[in-house]
Image (cartoon, rainbow, N blue to C red):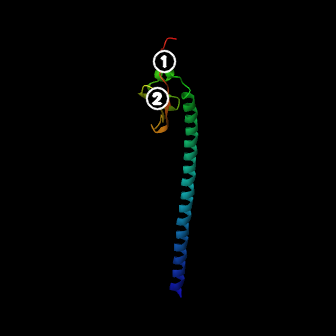
Amino acid sequence: MRARGGMVLLEAMIALAMLAIGAVSLITLADESLRAVRRADAADVATERASAFLDAIALWPRADLDRHLGDRAEGAWRLRVERPFPTLYTVTLADTLNGDVVLTTSLYRPEESHAVP
């Protein structure tokens, strides 16, 4: 009878240990999920800010785009303006901390005509 009592105690301890491991796993999963949601929210806010900045850049005339050709820091982003063709500009906004591209767009600007009226 005494050996059976010890076995019950051992089974109860094992069951409690398994329950504790399961509880810790659930808490860890919930914590990681919360962190993922926070990272996604931060990325969403950064994308919205970059989009607003890119909207302003899309209004720049050809002369402003030509003046900003190349790579430079602009606030929280790294702005790169390239002109692969005479009438096409590629604008890229990247994160200054890790260099990840946030947004990219292409802008068409017709060549100015120098015709004399």
Give the number of the disc on residue 68.
Answer: none
Report the number of numbered marks.
2
Residue kind at label 1, given as amino acid type:
Ser
Q: Eyeballing the image, is 65 above or below 46?
A: above
User: What residue sits right under mark 1 in the picture?
Assistant: 113
Q: Residue furthest top?
A: 116
User: What residue sits right under mark 2 in the picture?
Assistant: 89
Q: How far is the residue under mark 2 from the one under mark 1?
A: 18 Å
Comes first in the chain, label 2 or label 1 = 2
Q: Residue furthest front?
A: 117
Work out whether residue 10 can be spotted: yes
The local crowd at label 1, few if under 14, some if 14 to 19, many if 20 or more residues have their Cα within 10 Å, is: few
- Residue 71 placement (x, y as % from top left): 44, 28
Q: Secondary structure at mark 1?
A: loop
Q: Secondary structure at mark 2?
A: strand
- Residue 108 placement (x, y as % from top left): 49, 29
Please tell me which residue lies in front, 24 or 108. 108
> Depth-wise, is mark 2 or mark 1 nearer the camera?
1
Q: Eyeballing the image, is 10 above or below 105?
A: below
Is the C-beta separation of discs 2 and 1 under 8 Å? no
Q: Residue furthest bottom?
A: 1
- Residue at 55% over, 71% down: 16
Q: Eyeballing the image, is 112 above or below 34?
A: above
Q: Eyeballing the image, is 4 above or below 72?
A: below
- Residue at 56% over, 54% down: 33
Q: Quadrant of residue 50?
A: top right
- Residue 6 placement (x, y as % from top left): 52, 81
The local crowd at label 2, few if under 14, some if 14 to 19, many if 20 or more residues have their Cα within 10 Å, is: many
Please tell me which residue lies in front, 48 or 64. 64
Please tell me which residue lies in front, 45 or 70. 70
Residue kind at label 2, given as amino acid type:
Tyr
- Residue 34 placement (x, y as % from top left): 58, 52
